[in-house]
């Protein structure tokens, strides 16, 4: 049995981390080491909880390396052949690691295994991510960071990019793995549970489209050779996405034109505000 190293960065997540750790300890796969990276937590309750857990997990301490840097630091100390990052506020199903290892061992071309997911916390229900496809990955990230991959592949690509200050370092990392010629496999089963908080790094990122543009441009620049090898395919995907967005815009313009026939503008303004919020 090959060892799996679970890497769990934590920054002031004391109220959630015990739940996350329990989900790892309950795994049906038995050869697991759990590495918790305290990335400079300054919340007193979090510090107390981590100090108490020091005998139960491998606890490393860093100073504000941010998620990508904390993951890299944890992975650099990992002894497992396989790596699975799990954030300190999320949970994994008890069979996730066992099923992921079984898949990755069936085909040497597979470099990443992930699954379907649901949401809990501020929002509940299935996470509406599309089924995996290489074409979709060329355009946007559809693979969350809590996936299984080889430590040696992490070494080959230089780890998670610590210069992605706005986030999306997982997308940058998956593209680097794909550029190695590896494939990504999605288990068609909900085995990952993603916590939605009132405010997070993701919500802030999505609210700033200028920052989003800069980040996606940086990702493209980081992987120019990869995109160059897939240039024709990428161009067709971009064209399809553009046409889809034009169609969506025309649909909503038509809806608002119909609304204008029956309502006054103050009412329309309230409807628009409700939709946006």
Image (cartoon, grey):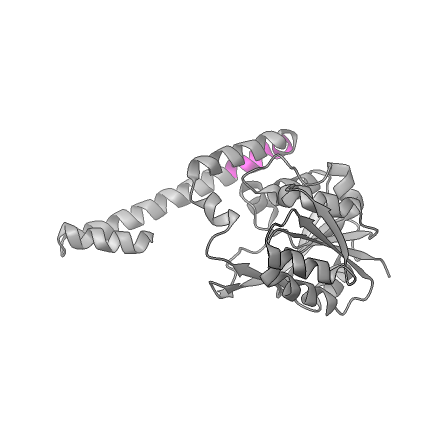
156 to the left or right of 242:
right
Q: Nearer the viewer, residue 59 or 81?
A: 59
* Quadrant holding the N terminus: bottom right
96 to the left or right of 262:
right
Q: Main secondary structure of the magenta part?
A: helix
**Percent position of residue 194, x then y:** 57, 60
Q: Quick check: is 50 in the magenta stretch?
A: no
Residue positioned 65% across, 29% down in the render: 225
**Percent position of residue 180, x then y:** 73, 39
194 to the left or right of 75:
left
Q: Nearer the viewer, residue 47 or 229?
A: 47
Which span is picked out in magenta? 227-236
Q: Specify the farthest residue to the right.
A: 1
Residue positioned 16% across, 52% down in the render: 266
Position of residue 145 relative to residue 216, above or below, is below
Q: Nearer the viewer, residue 106 or 78?
A: 78
Q: Quick check: is 229 in the magenta stretch?
A: yes
């Amino acid at each position: 049995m090959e060892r799996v190293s679970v890497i769990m960065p934590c920054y002031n997540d004391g109220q959630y981390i015990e739940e996350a750790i329990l989900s790892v300890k309950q795994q049906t796969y038995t050869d697991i080491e759990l590495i918790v990276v305290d990335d400079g937590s300054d919340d007193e309750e979090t510090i107390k909880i981590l100090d108490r857990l020091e005998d139960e997990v491998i606890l490393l301490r860093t100073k504000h390396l941010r998620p990508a840097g904390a993951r890299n630091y944890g992975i650099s100390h990992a002894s497992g052949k396989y790596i699975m990052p799990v954030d300190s506020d999320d949970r994994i199903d008890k069979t996730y690691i066992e099923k992921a290892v079984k898949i990755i061992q069936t085909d040497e071309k597979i470099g990443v295994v992930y699954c379907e997911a649901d949401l809990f916390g501020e929002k509940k229900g299935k996470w509406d991510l599309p089924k995996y496809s290489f074409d979709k990955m060329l355009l946007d990230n559809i693979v969350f960071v809590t996936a299984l991959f080889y430590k040696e592949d992490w070494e080959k690509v230089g780890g998670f990019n610590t210069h992605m200050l706005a986030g999306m370092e997982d997308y940058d990392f998956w593209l680097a793995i794909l550029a190695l010629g590896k494939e990504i496999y999605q288990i068609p089963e909900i085995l990952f549970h993603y916590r939605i908080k009132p405010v997070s790094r993701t919500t802030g990122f999505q609210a700033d489209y200028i920052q989003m543009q800069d980040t996606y441009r940086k990702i493209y620049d980081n992987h120019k050779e990869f995109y160059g090898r897939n240039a024709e395919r990428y161009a067709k995907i971009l064209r399809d996405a553009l046409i889809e967005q034009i169609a969506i815009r025309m649909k909503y313009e038509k809806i608002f034109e119909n609304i204008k026939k029956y309502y006054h503008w103050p009412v329309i303004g309230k409807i628009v505000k409700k939709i946006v919020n």
